[in-house]
Amino acid sequence: MELAEMIKKKVENTELPLSLKEELVSKLVKENITDEKIIDEIIEETVKAYKRTLVEPGEAVGVVAAQSIGEPGTQMSLPYDEKIVIKEGENVRLVEIGRFVDECIEKFGFVKQGVHEICDLPVDVYALSLDQDEKVHWKRITSVIRHRFSGKLIRIKTRSGRVITATPYHSFVVRQNNKVVPIEGRKLKVRDRIPAIRYMPLNCISAIDLAEFVSYPVSGDSIKPINGKVIDRKLELDFDLGYFLGIYLADGYSTKYFVSISNTNKEVIEIVRKLAERLGIKTAEYDNHSGFSKSHDIRLYSSVLSEFVQNFGSNAEEKKIPDFVFSAEKEFVRGILQGYFDGDGSVSVERKTIRAFSSSKDLIDEIALLLTRFGIFCVKRRVKGQYGIEISYRYAKRFAEEIGSSIPEKARKLEKLVESLKSKTTYDLIDVIPSIGSALLDASKKLGYPLHYARKFVRKQKIGRTTLQRHLTKLEELARAKNVELEELKVLRKAVESDVIWDEIVSIEEVNYDGYVYDLSVEGLETFTTAEGLITHNTMRTFHYAGVAELNVTLGLPRMIEIVDARKEPSTPMMTIYLEEDYRYDRAKAEKVAKEIESTTVDTVSKSVSIDLIRECITIELDEDRLRSRDLTIDDVVDAIKKKLKLKIEVDGNKLYLKIKNPSLKTLRKRLPKVRSVQLKGVPNIERVIIKKEGDEYVLYSEGSNLKEVFKIEGVDKTRTITNNIIEIQEVLGIEAARNAIINEMKSTLEEQGLDVDIRHLMLVADIMTADGEVKPIGRHGVGGEKASVLARAAFEETVKHLYTAAIRGYKDELKGVIENVIVGKPIYLGTGCVKLYIDRDYEEGKSINTTNLNNKVAEDRDN
């Protein structure tokens, strides 16, 4: 009995799944092994074997993998009308994925692979993407995919009222043991949790060109209707304009000649009057008795303004938010939200909610997305034909501080709602963090914190964000008092500060579909966001590399294809950087080297980089904390921009105003990406560097590769540092190093898949690829296309083309190789096929001893 208990305790602490743990305990007890050392070795080997067999869900392995080459994202797609969030330049768009992909394919063309049409994007378009740090970033869309689909789709609805429809094999992400991992849609079940964004990061625009939104004639810097008031074409996006548009969304309508707002609150009417006066627009006011109760209307007589606000919809059912609002200045967005909630919103202290309802579903979806600009998450409802949103009182303080209300009565209710936060702690069904692993329990044990709290949450494997924040604060205080740093606390802090809500699935249903389905390939974790705010995943092509959870590198079949195709740059370039003796054992020195390597651009150290149409310049708002962390000053940024772009710069505190000759919206937009990418420090192309302790030494892993420049950094061990970019190795270290890299990369990729291939096969491939002194691909553009034999080339690819060309040009095939001899049915020139045997029958029968005839025949055959 004691032996069984001892074995059970040892196995319990491993990472094996429950079924495997039970089987291992049963077998060890049955074998009656009493030597504890042998038991430990068996358990250790079992865990190692289990880890070796782990593969990412959906990753190609074995025979199935061999059949799937060149079939990215098989059946992993969304239907045409599923809207996604993308960013082009400074402009954010909510667009149907089908429309976006179709536009890209029509504009840039596509490559056909099986049933898939794939378009690699030559332009910079970004998707809102979730990373392993549970933060949301804008990541570049590298390619778009579409294919025909006929069958059942799955429609998933979450507790917050958000909905997404996808093919059953489309990939989503879930949280497992404090990591973000992919999962096929068909494997999701009710009560699983998928991510929905609660914070949307943006660089903002401060003004728009009104001429882009109306059809009236433009005269210089003005818009002049035929019989109307001239209006400046540059419209500043400030709070007052935002508030007016927000109240219009709630209580307004427009005709061809005027915009009307109906509201009885004098504070609302005063803000509208103030805006009209600023724009030089005439107004008229009157009491309205036509509705259920008395109202007060104010009309703004401007055909230009009327046409502009029709971009927000002209009646209740058509109300919507135009795309430019999502990337506008925060004050403008605050104005829109405050105006809308002052019009259609209500604050209920008894129900502890802030609510708003509309006849337009699009408007409610877009208001919900706009709220994430301020880190506010809402629940969507459908009540009696109306679409609504509810904001929990947990966000009341943030709502009051960031958005607020201009109506005194609503402002007082908001204050009461904020006060109610202090009096009571309740359970939150929505904002729950799942799969917290043992981090909370481990930290509690190490710091002497009461274990009954941690045990409860670890047993349930979920905890409310507010509750976790409360316990984490106390744990961090204990850690500071004891002067210790715990990795578990960092893991828990990451969970608390994540940019997403892990939204519980409440229903999964099937729907019929027949038509094209679509997908995106995105840098990093391959995630992107729908207009509903749900984050989804695409083709599950990336693995966590070498235990470094924060970095992803392409492995499996896609990586093998990259190697044998001799791609100029891997899809996920990375380096393993070893340090010299004086640096490798000291973390502070390792961090110093990492800072020297990690690329720092203007975009990296800026809160925002935007176009200011009022000042006619590019405005940079620098983040002084980020500057300090990278040992940079504002002067360093100014000097770097002047050196690179030779622009005139005005400095005002942490804001830089970049002046351009002959400024226009077009030239400013053209310059904006160049300003963002100005290099301030570090090695170009190295986006991120992570430090990991391996044994006694610290090793750096980089996202991005630049071997030549990294070798110049003091402290880098040039004899051991490697990159997965084989072409770069050839250019820096030579062809022999590239040959070794091909062998090592193929070997490690195959071993990751649990495949054991004799290294001589890999050496043969590497020798063929590098035989001419440069790395050449195995294919028609490399080794395959350079074969001397016409028949061998024709057998590989493009059969008709090779035979047709050979016939026209009169090529001759010597039939020296294996393939061409097999094709024509001759013995191959190998082994016994290398020898030709001639027999002189006359000599054999003694009729003649003259060998002249035999020699002549041999010579004749040689000539032929």
Image (tube, rainbow, N blue to C red):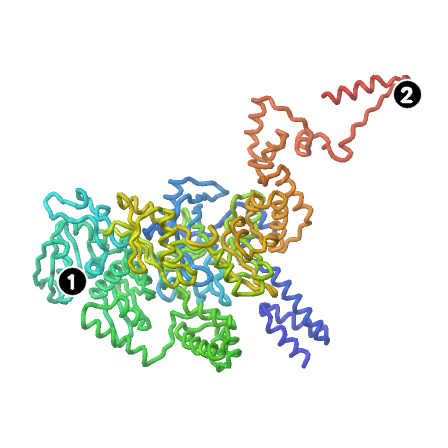
Q: Residue at x 60, y 45 (%)?
A: 738
Rounded to the nearest whole Å, what is the CA distance between mark 2 and mark 1? 122 Å
Most extreme residue toward the right is: 846
How far from the left and from the top, in percent, is residue 164?
39, 58
Q: Amino acid at mark 2?
A: Glu
**In which quadrant will I find the N terminus?**
bottom right
Residue at image x 9%, y 64%? 289
* Residue 816: % across, % down: 69, 30
Residue 39 visible to an observer of this rendering = yes
Residue at 60% from the left image edge and 62% from the top image edge: 51
Relative placement, left or right, of 627 versus 298 is right
Q: Quadrant of residue 846?
A: top right
Location of mark 2 (residue)? 845
Q: Residue at x 76, y 19 (%)?
A: 860
Q: How many marks?
A: 2
Name the residue carrying label 1.
271
Q: Quadrant of the C terminus?
A: top right
Q: Which image quadrant for residue 55?
A: bottom right
Residue 165 lies, in percent from the top left, at 40, 56
Residue 444 circle label: none
- State which tag comes first along the sequence, 2 or 1: 1
Residue 312 rendering spot, x and y as whole percentages? 23, 54
Tag 1: amino acid? Ile
- Regarding residue 98, the answer to whether it shows in the image is no
- Going by the image, does 606 lie left or right of 132? left
